[in-house]
Every structure is written in structure tokens, then in C-alpha cells.
């Protein structure tokens, strides 16, 4: 399987180039970054995109035009953006996987947070990342919040209780009614805590990524699976058998 990487000079892209080069059955045919001619990627079966939210949609339009499957780790995807990606690939002959997080622990953290959501009156999310990250809240935190909000709605839970009437911004972002707090700190890489509370008890689910190597098994699994997953697939839970 021939693989091209977009964002190849970035922190994640460089790690993906290494992982693809060392993986059985995969060959790295193009490692491209901003401003570079995409022609060398035209022979690829799969493009892996770890770029920036402002660039990813144009990259995906190019993949769809060329009938090349795409595996996307770049964040910043709202439900509306995902709809636009689905539309881009209709009739292209290619498939696309978009995942805010490829690490097994983060997938389990989101899965268990969704499970716990219906049992707790209160919930908030704290995501902690390196200070070079451009988007906040993180894609993982936004995805977790949306999944928790959906689970609460399914369970008939009302809004998270919050008496705040004077807020100078300290209550964080509101993602579908779930508060998300972002910390950017030198020395950190990527961590998330989902904090649940009921009268008299609490539950915290914490995930820590220590290095970018944590994402590589998931990225490689998605590269190998994308050709057999028609249209748009959001998340790699189905590929790894999480939640089934
Ligand atoms: N899904 C997941 O598991 C993970 C997702 N991410 C996400 O991946 C993205 C990249 O993160 P990092 O590697 O830390 O960022 P980075 O800033 O180190 O790398 C981004 C790279 O993309 C390049 N780029 C910008 N526009 C481009 C274009 N049009 N074509 C090709 N390359 C272009 C930049 O020059 C840069 O080298 C972020 O959105 C981040 O949130 C990061 C870690 C894990
Ligand atoms: O930018 C990062 O570093 C990360 N981005 C992803 C996100 O926004 O969720 C995944 C992980 O948190 C690392």
C-alpha cells in the first residue's frame, strides 16, 4: 500500500513518516509540507493528513478529486465540517477516516466517559496540552463533550447545574452544554480529565499521552482499513473493536 503524508515536517507528520517507513506492507511515496507540489502524492493509495485546521479541507478536496483515500488526524472538525467532508468524497471512489485521537487510551477514555455520562448530574472536561498547539479546545475534548452531551440527552438528563451569573471567562468553553477548560503548559504533551460529580461522590477519568508514538498503532490500523470503509468514518473505534 502506497502512503503519502501531508504535514510531514510537523510533530505528528514526522512521526507518521517514520512509522509508515518501518511498517510491513506500507511504502512512503511522498512526505509533503505546506506550499509543496502535491504531484508526488498522486500515486498514493492513502494520504495521511496531520496539518492544521485551516489547511485540511483543501487537502481533502485534492484527495477526493484524485480518488485517493484519506486518513485525517488534523483537528478542528465540527459536525458541519464533517458533513462537508462527507459531501466531498461522495462519488470520488475514495474513502475518508477522520479521528480526533488515534491512541487506544484516549478512545477508551471517551468510551467510558460516554458510558458514565448518564449516571452523573455534573460533568466538566479539562484538557492539558503543550503550548505550541493552535486549536482550543482540543479535538479530543470537543469530541468527548459532544458524546457526553448526546448520552445525557438520550438519558433525559437536563442541563449541568451551574449557578454562575457573573463570568469573566473562567467557566471555559461551552460545547453542547458541557464546559471544557484548556490548559497550555510547557513540559506537557497531551492529557485529558473528564470529571463527573453527584451528591456525595465523584469519578474522574484521566488519559495521558506521553509521546507521539502512542498514536502510531491507531494511525497504521486506519491506513490499512480505510479502503474497506465506504464514505466517511468518524473515529477508529469500529476498526479497533471498541464499544462493539
Ligand atoms: N488525531 C490524533 O490522534 C492527533 C491529532 N493531532 C492533531 O494533528 C494536527 C497537527 O499537529 P502537530 O503535528 O502537533 O502540528 P505541527 O504544527 O507540528 O505540524 C503541522 C504541519 O502541517 C504543515 N502544513 C500546514 N499547512 C499545510 C498544507 N496545506 N499542506 C501540507 N502541510 C501543511 C505545517 O507546515 C506543519 O509542518 C493538529 O491539528 C493536532 O491537533 C495531534 C496529535 C494526535
Ligand atoms: O495537538 C496535539 O498535540 C493533539 N491534538 C489532538 C487533539 O486536539 O485532541 C490529539 C491530542 O490531544 C494531541
Image: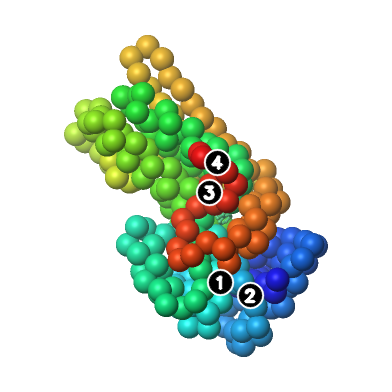
Q: Quadrant of residue 158?
A: top left
Q: Circle 3 is placed at which residue position? A: 238
**Label 2 with label 4: CB-CB less than 8 Å:** no
Give how far apart the Cα atoms at labels 1 and 3 are. Answer: 18 Å
Picture coordinates of residue 135, whole percent (x, y): 46, 57
- Within-10-Å neighbours for mark 3: few <14, some 14–19, many 20+: few
Residue 3 location (% of width, % of height): 67, 72
Q: Secondary structure at mark 3?
A: helix
Marking on residue 69: 1
Disc 1 element:
strand
Question: Which residue has dot 4 on it?
Answer: 242
CA separation, marks 2 and 4?
A: 26 Å
Q: Position of residue 54 (x, y in %)?
A: 44, 70
Residue under the point 45% across and 38% down: 126
Image-based side of 155 in relation to 221, left or right: left
Say which residue appears at 41% left-offset and 68% top-offset. 85
Whichever of callouts 4 and 1 sits on the residue coming sooner in the sequence is 1
Q: Are marks 3 and 2 in contact (CB under 8 Å)?
A: no
Q: Residue at x 57, y 43 (%)?
A: 241
Disc 1 to disc 2, C-alpha distance: 6 Å
Residue 32 occupies which quadrant of the picture?
A: bottom right
Above/below status of 201 relative to 163: above
Decide if ligand 1 comes within 8 Å of the CB at mark 1: no
Q: Are marks 1 and 2 in contact (CB under 8 Å)?
A: yes
Image quarter in which the N terminus is found: bottom right
Q: Earlier in the sequence, mark 1 or mark 2?
A: 2
Which of the two labelled residues, at mark 1 and mark 3, occupies the earlier sequence position? 1
Amino acid at each position: 500500500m502506497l502512503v503519502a503524508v501531508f504535514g510531514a515536517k510537523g510533530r505528528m507528520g514526522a512521526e507518521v513518516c517514520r512509522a509508515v517507513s518501518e511498517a510491513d506492507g506500507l511504502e512512503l511515496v511522498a512526505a509533503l509540507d505546506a506550499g509543496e507540489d502535491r504531484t508526488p502524492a498522486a500515486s498514493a493509495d492513502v494520504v495521511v493528513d496531520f496539518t492544521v485546521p485551516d489547511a485540511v479541507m483543501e487537502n481533502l478536496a485534492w484527495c477526493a478529486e484524485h480518488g485517493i483515500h484519506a486518513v485525517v488526524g488534523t483537528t478542528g472538525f465540527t459536525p458541519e465540517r464533517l458533513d462537508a467532508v462527507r459531501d466531498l468524497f461522495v462519488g470520488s471512489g475514495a474513502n475518508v477516516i477522520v479521528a480526533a485521537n488515534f491512541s487506544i487510551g484516549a478512545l477508551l477514555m471517551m468510551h467510558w466517559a460516554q458510558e458514565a455520562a448518564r449516571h452523573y448530574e455534573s460533568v466538566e472536561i479539562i484538557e492539558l496540552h503543550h503550548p505550541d498547539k493552535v486549536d482550543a479546545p482540543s479535538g479530543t475534548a470537543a469530541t468527548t463533550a459532544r458524546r457526553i452531551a448526546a448520552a445525557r440527552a438520550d438519558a433525559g438528563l437536563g442541563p449541568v447545574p451551574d449557578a454562575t451569573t457573573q463570568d469573566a471567562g473562567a467557566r471555559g468553553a461551552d460545547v453542547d452544554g458541557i464546559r471544557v477548560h484548556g490548559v497550555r503548559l510547557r513540559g506537557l504533551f497531551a492529557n485529558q480529565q473528564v470529571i463527573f460529580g453527584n451528591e456525595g461522590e465523584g469519578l474522574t477519568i484521566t488519559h495521558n499521552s506521553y509521546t507521539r508514538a502512542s498514536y502510531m498503532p491507531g494511525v497504521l490500523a486506519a491506513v490499512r482499513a480505510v479502503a474497506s470503509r465506504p464514505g466517511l468514518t468518524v473515529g477508529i473505534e469500529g476498526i479497533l473493536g471498541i464499544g462493539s
